[in-house]
Amino acid sequence: MTDLVFSQLTDLFRIGLIIALVVTMQRTAAVTGRVLPLILGVVFVAVMIPATMPSGSGSLTHAVLAGLVSNSIILIPVLAGARLIARLRR
């Protein structure tokens, strides 16, 4: 399970989707809010990637659970970077 999380942490497609999720959340925050779109986006990415691009190792359940963990870990620095960029723009 640990190897699966580490491999997902270095997945550039997953990182790009999380960055796009944060950018989209910032643009639509006035209408949809912030927390719910982030939670749903993290879950969506965690389920979508292993469901559409299955790898031979492990079950779908393990891949989704590892995806939830790795997406949450990736989300933290992306949100911090987005907040820093927003602060520097002011």
Image (cartoon, grey):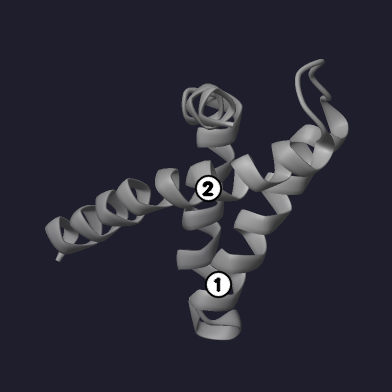
Q: Secondary structure at mark 2?
A: helix
Of 32 and 42, nearer the camera is: 42
| Quadrant the C terminus occupies | bottom left
Horizontally, residue 88 falls left or right of residue 47, namely left
Q: Position of residue 40 (x, y in %)?
A: 66, 66
Give me the disc on residue 69.
Answer: 2
Give me the disc on residue 28.
Answer: 1
Residue at 51%, 41% (x, y): give it: 70
Residue at 53%, 32% (x, y): give it: 5
Residue at 86%, 32% (x, y): give it: 52
| Quadrant the N terminus occupies | top right
Of 41 and 59, nearer the camera is: 59
Q: Secondary structure at mark 1?
A: helix
Res. 7 image quadrant: top right
Q: Earlier in the sequence, mark 1 or mark 2?
A: 1
Q: Position of residue 18 (x, y in %)?
A: 53, 45
Q: Position of residue 29 (x, y in %)?
A: 50, 76
Amino acid carrying label 1: it is Thr
> Compared to 14, does 11 lie above or below?
above
Dot 1, how many residues are within 10 Å of its Cα: few (below 14), some (14-19), or many (20+)? few
Horizontally, residue 45 falls left or right of residue 39, namely right
Horizontally, residue 2 falls left or right of residue 61, namely left
